[in-house]
Amino acid sequence: MAHTLPSSDQSSDQDKWDSGGLECKGQLLIKIVMRNRLTALVVDGDTTCWVLEQELLHSYGVQTLGVDNSRDAVDLIASDAEFNLIIIEKILPVLNGLAVTRQICEIGVRCKMLEVTACSRESERQAFLAIGVDVFIERPLDPEHLVPILRELDGQ
């Protein structure tokens, strides 16, 4: 079967995605989420940030669970809870983000991990990436960072 490029009046889903149309992006993400039933764990000691991150994920149809400290996150992961995405803040009660990420990786979790922080240096970014974090970004978590991650999870 021959592959054809869309004409100028017809566009593929990828073209619609790249054009920046928010409505189309939302429709495509809903298809992704419904097909894969994506889930995320949000680990953040700042209640405001925790709620905002969960609301952003909910707006794309992602089911979320949030915890406000590292101990609860490790306990949850150790109880065999499974997530497609784990979002971890660097500054947390009990253990810092680096220590909790290391523990989660040692448990054997193999999902997408995203480190979100308001204060970052290159050495910190490298440390997180070295222990298993897939993406390290400065706050805020926004659609420009989240959408590509959700699209990547669609391929799983």
Image (cartoon, rainbow, N blue to C red):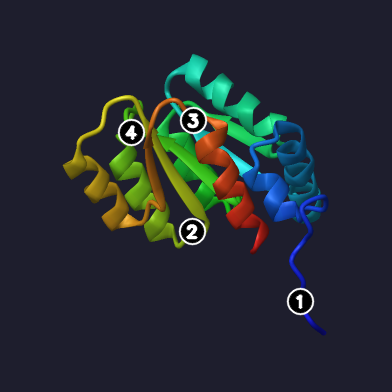
Q: Considering depth in this image, is 41 or 52 the residue closer to the camera? A: 52
Q: Which residue is mark 4?
A: 90
Q: Nearer the viewer, mark 3 or mark 1?
A: 1
Query: Which is nearer the N-term, disc 2 or disc 1?
Result: 1
Q: State if disc 2 and disc 3 touch (CB < 8 Å).
A: no
Q: Amino acid at mark 2?
A: Val
The residue at the point 43 percent across, 37 percent down is 88
Mark 1 or 4 closer to N-term? 1
**Residue lying farthest to the top in this orientation:** 48
Q: CA distance from mark 1 to mark 4?
A: 46 Å
Q: Secondary structure at mark 2?
A: loop
Quarter of the image with the N terminus is bottom right
State how far apart marks 3 and 1 are (Cα).
37 Å
Q: Amino acid at mark 4?
A: Lys
Give the distance between the C-alpha atoms of the residues marked 2 and 4, in whole angstroms: 18 Å
Identify residue for label 3.
141
Up the image or down, 102 lies above or below 110; here it is above
For residue 156, side relative to residue 128 (left or right): right
Q: Could you give the CA–CA distance between mark 4 and mark 3, rounded to whole angstroms? A: 13 Å
Q: CA distance from mark 2 to mark 1?
A: 39 Å
* Residue under pointer 1: 3
Secondary structure category for the residue under label 3: loop
Q: Which residue is mark 2?
A: 109
- Residue positioned most to the front: 8
Of residues 17 and 33, the one nearer the viewer is 17
